[in-house]
Amino acid sequence: MEYNSLLSRQMTRYLPEEFRNDTRLAPFLQAINDYYVSEERDRKISEHAFAISEREYQELYENMRSQNEVIRQSIQQLREAISRIAADSQQDFNAQNDDILYIISFLKDQIEKSKDIEKYLIQARDSAEAAAKAKSDFLSVMSHEIRTPLNAIIGYIHLLINENPLPAQVEYLNILQISARNLLSLINDVLDFSKIEEGKIVFADSDFDLRMLLNDIRQAHKVMAEENGNSIRVMVDEEIPRFLKGDTTRLTQILNNLISNAIKFTKKGKIVIELELKSVLDKKCEIFFSITDNGIGISEESQQNIFERFTQAHQYITRQFGGSGLGLAIIKKLLSLMGSDIFVESQPGKGSKFYFTLELEKSNIITIDDVEVPKVKEDLGGIRILLVEDVFFNAMLARKMLNNWNAVVDIAENGLIAVEKARKEKYDLILMDVQMPVMDGLTATTEIRKFNPDIPVFPLTASTSTDMQEKFIRLGVNEFIFKPINPDSLFNTISRFVVKRHLKGNTEPGQ
């Protein structure tokens, strides 16, 4: 029988050979052998368990030491952060105190104070938002109240000038017209800048004839340019598509402001409006605009701040030439919202060049070269217009203008009457006042869209409310006519509709 190695050595040493195979000792030797085997197994298990415990202990120790170091560094950073907070809040904090309970207690106090501050900030924010809304509502109301009578003043001056006044009266009417337009320009600048500051500018997206737009702008400035002995020249790259899509109101505003500035600061000179096609990508056209004059120019020092609000190049400019100092600031902000910027190159006594680049989308309107487009500059071809206006003298003024252009005009005194007339009669377009009793223009347009979704609606508004414009745009209305109504702007807006209708082949009024 094979015994444990230790027992075998002991038997060899202490047990005579004749007793080793004695069967009477076999159970005894087997018991001793089993004990040794069990002892050895237990020893190996103990050694293995100790080795594992030692390794686990080392790993646990290293892990705890690492965590303690992280805790130490965290406490240190927390102390430093709290020290800065305490320094800002002028509260005592012992930065050398390692007691975590002390740190946590101090931090708890700071969190509670921060929550109190947060409540005050929320209240202040709510108050500021309420004040901003009140300001916006006030400006909207004041805009309507100021522009409504101004609409009549400018409109009737226009009618008087075009009804062969006496020679002695022409000068007075011209002075009245210039004064009224200057007042309107100032009101528009202040209200527009306020809307831009609040981020409440909505850009429309409508089809327009770029060359017609530029010609209309040139004609609008022709009289003022001639008064200063200036000439205006328009140069358009032949590669630029005739029809584009964009916000014609804002583009016209930008160009009008730059051109009027050029005319104002130039005597017996020339103003050049130049457009160049820079690139075409898919349906996008990148167009370079520049307005150049040879007027008084701007010093290099003044060029740094002329785009700031209420800023003129020189103090004497406001006294000599007038102006709010908001025009260029508005242009810069508008172009920024349109993804562009404006730049200037100028030398005193040699003139100025303002330029910018705009990305405009190609229109889906296709130019029909072999079709003669009617000369809508002379009349509106007998188109039927529903004029919705609750103020009597404004309604009479607008109808007189439209009749002078050979339009057929039907008047509705409020939105409810307009809905009934639009349901029973066929009109080519609707001029819709916005603020009216009984039913406002937005509600009326919504109702009309239910049974006639395609009829063009042009809102007439003296309000600056962006929310109102957004609601009209959702109804498919992309062009607004702002009060006071500029006769040229009114005519150009309607005549663009006439040209579009002609290109589409619909030439009969009332269809």
Image (cartoon, rainbow, N blue to C red):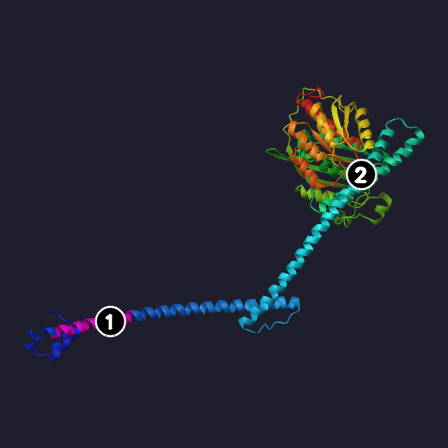
Residue 399 picture quarter: top right
Majority SS type along the magenta span: helix
Q: Which residue is mark 1?
A: 42
The secondary element bearing badge 2 is classed as: helix
Residue 39 picture quarter: bottom left
Instruction: Using a 10 Å C-alpha cutoff, classify the residue at mark 2 as few (fewer than 14 neighbours), some (14 to 19) or many (20 or more).
Output: many
Q: Is residue 349 left or right of residue 201?
A: right
Answer yes or no: is residue 448 visible.
yes
Height in image: 102 above or below 353? below
Q: Amino acid at mark 1?
A: Asp
Residue 278's tag is: none
Q: Write the residue at 71% across / 50% down.
A: 130
Q: Which residue is mark 2?
A: 147
What is the magenta range? 28-48
Q: Amino acid at mark 2?
A: Arg
Q: Quadrant of the N terminus?
A: bottom left
The answer to whether residue 38 is magenta is: yes
Q: Is residue 127 left or right of residue 488?
A: left
Camera-nearest residue between 476 and 15: 476
Residue 89 point in image, percent of width and height: 66, 67
Instruction: Using a 10 Å C-alpha cutoff, classify the residue at mark 1 as few (fewer than 14 neighbours), some (14 to 19) or many (20 or more).
Output: few
Q: Write the residue at 74% across / 23% down.
A: 384
The secondary element bearing badge 1 is classed as: helix
